[in-house]
Each structure stands twice: as C-alpha cells, then as structure tokens.
Amino acid sequence: MVKPSVFIAIALYTSALAASQVSSLIEKKAQGQWQVTYSTASPVQRMVFKRNPDGSRAKHWVAQSELYKISYQDGVEAVVRLDGQPFREVSFDLPAVYTPLPKEYAAFSPFSDGGMLLHSGRFFACAEHCQPELNSWTLTLKAPVGENIIVGGKLYQNEVTWQERDSGSKLYLGKASPLAGPDFISLIDSELPLILQQQINSQLPQLMAYFTSQMGALNFRPALFASFSTTADGSYGHQGGTLPGQIFMHWYGDKAIEKLQPDAVFWFFAHEVAHLYQREASAIEPSQDAWVHEGAAEYLSGLATTEVQQNKQMLQQKLTDAGQHCVAGLENQRHYTKAAAANTQLHYSCGLLLNHAIDQQLRQVDPEMTFFRLWSLFNAQVQAGQTAQAATYLTVLKAYVSAEFWQQLHLFSSQEDFDALTLMQQLRVAYQLSLVKPSIQEGQL
Ligand SMILES: [Zn+2]
C-alpha cells in the first residue's frame, strides 16, 4: 500500500523528473550474456545509482566503452565519462552470478537450469542525483527466444516494459514455467535437494494456513521463488526475503545444502512467511527500527514452530541464544542505534527478546489481546497512512502493556543515549527466571 503523501509528492515532481529520468534496459543475449543499457531524454554529466550497499558495481560491471567508468565515492556509485563530456546512453556487461550484498538483495540469483531471478532495485538509477522524492523507475527486460519473463506475477515473452517503485521486486527470466498452486505461484529449482523441495511443498502451505488462521488471509497469492546455484570459490549460505507479494529463497554453494537441519529450515520459512503476514507494516523505514519487524518475524517463527511443529524447545533455545548475543553485542556499545548499525544481527536477537517481552506483557495485561492482533492493529495504522516505524508500533502497543514497560520501550526507541544494555540484561534475566518459575515470573519485565 502506498501512502497518500507519496502520491502527492510524485504529482508535484512529475514535470521536474520527466527530463531527468533514466530508463534501464536489462537484456539477456541469445548466447547467455547479460547487459544493461541506461538512457536519458537529455544529456547528463553523471548517472547515479539509487541503492548503494557497497562499491561492487564499480568492481564487477564492465562498461562496453572505455570512455565510461563507475566511481564509488561517499557511499554512492555513479557513472561518469572519463573526458567529462555529457552523455545520454551507457551500457554495461554484467556478471550474472550470485553476489551477496550487505543488507541488500542480490542482483542475480541463478537457477540450476540457467534461469535467473533478478532484483530490479539493483538497476534503479537517476540523472545527476537521486532526489529522495524520486520513486518511479522505468525498466525493460528483454529475453532470448523461448524464455519466459515473470514480472509482477504475470508471464511475458520477448520483452516487457514496466514501472517500479520502493525497494523494487524480483523478476524471473528463464525457460521454466511457474506452477500455480492454491497458496503460491511458485518456481522451485529442480536441483534443490529433494528433502528441501518436500519441505517447501509441505511446510509453506502449513505456515500459510497457520498465519491465515491468526492474522487473516492475504488478499493476493504470493509468488514463491526457490533457487540454488553452485559457487566456484567454495562460498556457501542462503538468503531469503520478501518483497510485496513475493517470497524468495536462494541457497548457494554445495555446503549450504549438504547438512540441512529440518528445524532450522522450518524456522527460516516461518520467518519469511511471517513477513508476508506483517503486510505493509513490515516495510519499516528507519534502519534503527528494524528490531520491530525482524524481531517480530523471529518471534512469530517461534510461535509457528511451537504450534505447527509442536516444538517448544526451539523458541526457548533461540531466546536463550538471543539473550546471550544481544547482551554481548551491547557490552562495548550500550547505545542501541550505534551498536546495531555496526552489527545488524542485533535487530534479530535483541528484537526477539523485545518482542517476546511484549507478548508476555500483552498476555498479562489483557488476556483478550494477542501478538497477532497487535500486528493486525499496527498494520491497520500503517494502511491508514501512519509511517511503518517503531514509534507507530509503540503507540498501538501503549494500551495493552504496563506504563512502566511502555516507558522503557519508548526511551529505548527514541533516545540515542539510552542504556540499552541494562534493559536487555533485565529482559534476559526475566526470561531465564520464567523458565525456572513460569507461574511467578512470566510476564514481568
Ligand atoms: Zn526478515
């Protein structure tokens, strides 16, 4: 859901943007090479990328003309001409391999059969500067004969041009055809180990049914992409994510699938499906507030694991580990925003502790209230135009927790110099005590 303020901003800026807009043509050639061509209506001195997690375009993208280069300065990548002349078009050859990016979706997630999942946001570019108000990009994707393109849940051949916004979306280009099931429109890599394919086929629908029963049905059928690629350098791992209407999971490197732990895979699925059900409220804007949706997705995974898998120990173990990780991460830097900026995993560990404590409070203060309902109320506020941020979450929460607990959360999320270490230590001790004496301690800070 797009907030009305964004529509107004776009209406005001449209005329100014028309001249400065950059169109991107992403193309897979018949021989399999990938390239991108940027063009503008009028000449520009430089073209700037919207999303800059690091300087890896400058390292890996190869300009087709030696006249151009990508510079990386002050955290922004920009295309310039070496002779300083203005330009209207520039093309790059792209390495279509899985390259993990810090806090950003990878540009290419290959499927074993040569198909490719792309992240459109990687290609967003602006003329001269990326104005914060600019939130519309024109992309064209061109496929070789016989390959399918999937954009926004629709199937195309040859070529498609469309508009993108916000964080972008995942696009598919390849020979596979999506399978339309009752829960998902899915594309699952045939090289994924059978056990993983079986888990996807059986557990994702179970998770959808569980979250639907608690938080209501989604009003769309999400696209599901699950892919696997080998690596040449021995690296391995997995990445999952959700974008509006899409859920995707990529495993890379043989080691990533050699010793899969079914419980850990279920938790990973549950975390991603939880984001789908967080709906618009999952688009938390300030990065220091990521404990809200990431921590809640972790906690929702714990609830799903407890209920669907009948596995209570996993949430207990995660909370114990999270307590240790969170407190250790704050020992040398008690200010949460700074500590989490350097170590984003704190949003998951401290976020799990915080959201678990919130649920304990809900249960104690108002037996009618549930954590699922809290998220539905929060989402309703975001849909009504409130910003998806911690302050909105806490405003919704205020009526359902003790004044003292709420004040602690408020200070934690609004004051940069708040002593987060002490708060997290208290939450950790309260959790440890609740394991020993559940009837007495449960629900306390
Ligand atoms: Zn997440």
Image: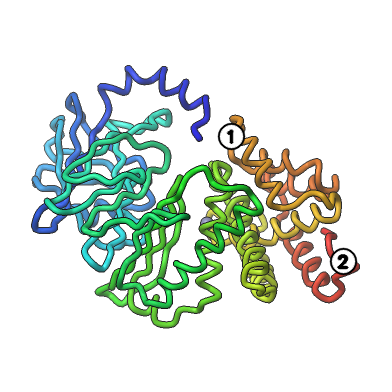
Q: Quadrant of residue 324?
A: bottom right
Q: Residue furthest front?
A: 182
Q: Quadrant of residue 60?
A: bottom left
Task: Looking at the image, tell me whether mark 1 or mark 2 is earlier in sequence order.
Answer: 1
* Depicted 406 relative to depicted 315: above or below: above
Residue 347 is situated, as x and y percent measured from the top left of the image, at 59, 57
Residue 207 or residue 122, whichever sits in front: 207
Residue at horizontal 58 percent and vertical 43 percent from the top: 281
Q: Which residue is mark 1?
A: 383
Does residue 363 appear left or right of residue 224 in this picture? right
Q: In the image, what residue type sits under mark 1?
A: Gln
Q: Which mark is residue 441?
A: 2
Residue 394 is situated, as x and y percent measured from the top left of the image, at 71, 43
Mark in front: 1 vs 2: 1
Does residue 123 appear left or right of residue 392 in this picture? left
Report the number of numbered marks: 2
Q: Residue furthest bottom?
A: 259
Does residue 265 appear left or right of residue 68 in this picture? right
Q: Quadrant of residue 310?
A: bottom right
Q: Which mark is residue 3?
A: none
Residue at horizontal 83 percent and vertical 71 percent from the top: 433
Q: Label 2 crowding class (10 Å Cα cut-off): few <14, some 14-19, many 20+?
A: some
Q: In the image, what residue type sits under mark 2?
A: Gln
